[in-house]
Amino acid sequence: MPAAPPSRPPAAKPLGVQLARLAVLVIVIGITIAIYSLGDQTAALAAYGYPGLFLLSILANATIVLPAPGLALVFVFAGKLSPLGVGLAAAAGATLGELSGYLAGFSGQAIIENRGLYQRLEGYMRRYGALTIVILAFLPLPIFDLAGVAAGALKLPVQKFLFWCFLGKLPKMLLIALAGAYSIGWVAGLLR
């Protein structure tokens, strides 16, 4: 039997592409570090109502894998503001915040692609695409970051990613806002 021809290594990407991907990855990591260094300063944004919640939601969802208290903020804000407005502001901010995972996948996909969970999520993204994004955006689990990474790595158009992400985030945020509005009102009534 003749020997198999030697396999060629994959062609290297141009240096400019590699540097651009590295720069985006460094920016995403920098955003995550900045969010955690803000600490108590997020309370100042809370005084700004819906715009403050929108910004806090962006920050809370811009972290990759490390959870931030975004859902707790939605719950608390709904006790003081309209649950519908809180749900909309939080869903819009959370959707934009998820761009960090998308950009990490678009730029540095080799960082996570060999992990088992990531490979399963990537398979679901290839097969079910939009449905995977909507379902995972709805679930209050930090694995959505990996779905964003997979969407970016698969080069899903960003506008489609944002649309499907918003469709999953909106009902989740509305449910949490409604729960916050009614439970905080109920507790306040008990304390009177």
Image (tube, grey):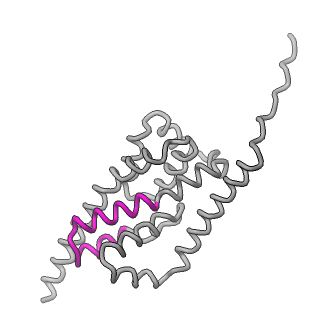
Q: Nearer the viewer, residue 172 or 47?
A: 47
Does the magenta portion include 90? yes
- Horizontal and vertical percent for residue 192? 12, 89
For the stretch drawn in magenta, the main secondary structure is helix
Number of callouts: 0
Q: Nearer the viewer, residue 51 or 176?
A: 51
Figure check: 76 above or below 171:
below
Q: Residue placed at 67% from the left, 48% from the top?
A: 110
Magenta region, residue range: 71-97
Query: Is 101 displayed left or right of 140 in the figure?
Result: right
- Horizontal and vertical percent for residue 71? 36, 67
User: In which quadrant will I find the N terminus?
Assistant: top right
Query: Is 37 displayed left or right of 179 in the figure?
Result: right
- Horizontal and vertical percent for residue 105? 58, 50
Q: Residue placed at 87% from the left, 17% from the top?
A: 3
- Horizontal and vertical percent for residue 166? 36, 53
Does the magenta portion include 154? no
Figure check: 13 above or below 29:
above
Q: Residue furthest right?
A: 2
Q: Specify the quadrant of the image occupied by residue 72.
A: bottom left
Q: Residue placed at 58% from the left, 45% from the top?
A: 153
Q: Residue placed at 70% from the left, 48% from the top?
A: 17
Q: Residue furthest bottom?
A: 192
